[in-house]
Image (tube, helix red, strand yellow):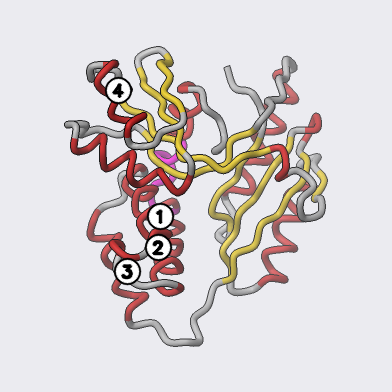
Amino acid sequence: MSGHSKWATIHRKKGELDAARGKVFQKLAKEIYVAAKQGTPDPASNASLRMVIEKARSANMPKDNIEKAIQKAKGASEGENYESIRYEGYGPSGVAIIVDCLTDNRNRTAGDVRSKFTKRGGNLGTAGSVSYMFERKGIISIPSEYDEESMMMTALDAGADDFETEDDVYVITTKPEDFVKVKESLEQAGVKEFLTSEVTFTPNNMVELTDPEQIEKVHGLIEALEELDDVQDVYCNLKED
């Protein structure tokens, strides 16, 4: 689940990725393939591909898997096409949800996503019904073992919007277009471990639920959506402790 700035949620996301590594890698490979096919297979001249590769690295996707997806795009026929579709709606207790998909069958994907919302107590909305509540940002988090002042200056000088310390983690936010530059600057400054690094949707306002049953219902819907093969990312504005 994406779209949260707190380290607890980043940690939870990392655990979810580890639990379903194979399926996550398949989805990332498709995203890399699409970015490479729609632009150029050279990351140096394809900003979209660079950002997807950074996302894959953050999920610990092996370098060989990344290269295979790029090579597949180089030899792909014109008939192999995926379409990017975004769905928006509300989950249980009015939690706002965005679902990003890559599909070769729009009708199948629409039916699958609508079914998950309906069966799990949510409502699928129209385009723009919840996306106005979110902002596209680059999120980079690194262990606080590095010197705080040095890392802060490096990030801000490279164009980062904010630098926060949360528990034992530094969380850096950027504009999408500055994300790669900021990460490369941190690497040049000696950072070798990135806990997360991706361009994502972050909510402007969070919904806080106190009823454990309602929280589980929201988690159940999000997990059900993430299990769909056509779904790449799910974002919501549920506040996590």
Mark 1 falls on what kind of element? helix
User: Dot 2: within a 10 Å radius of its alpha carbon, few (fewer than 14), some, or many (20 or more) residues?
Assistant: many
Rendered position, 67 above or below 53: below
Q: Position of residue 218 (x, y in %)?
A: 70, 33
Chain-order first, disc 3 or disc 1: 1
Mark 3 touches mark 2? (CB < 8 Å): yes
Chain-order first, disc 3 or disc 4: 3
For the residues marked 4 and 1, what is the alpha-carbon distance in whole angstroms? Answer: 22 Å
95 in magenta: no
Q: Which residue is mark 2?
A: 32
Q: Residue at x 43, y 16 (%)?
A: 166
Mark 3 falls on what kind of element? helix
Segment tinted magenta in the rendering: 16-23
User: Dot 1: within a 10 Å radius of its alpha carbon, few (fewer than 14), some, or many (20 or more) residues?
Assistant: many
Q: Which residue is mark 1?
A: 52
Q: Which label was assigned to residue 143?
A: 4
Q: Which residue is mark 3?
A: 70
Q: Amino acid at mark 3?
A: Ile
Q: Give the overall secondary structure of the magenta segment.
A: helix
Chain-order first, disc 3 or disc 2: 2
Image quadrant containing the N terminus: top right
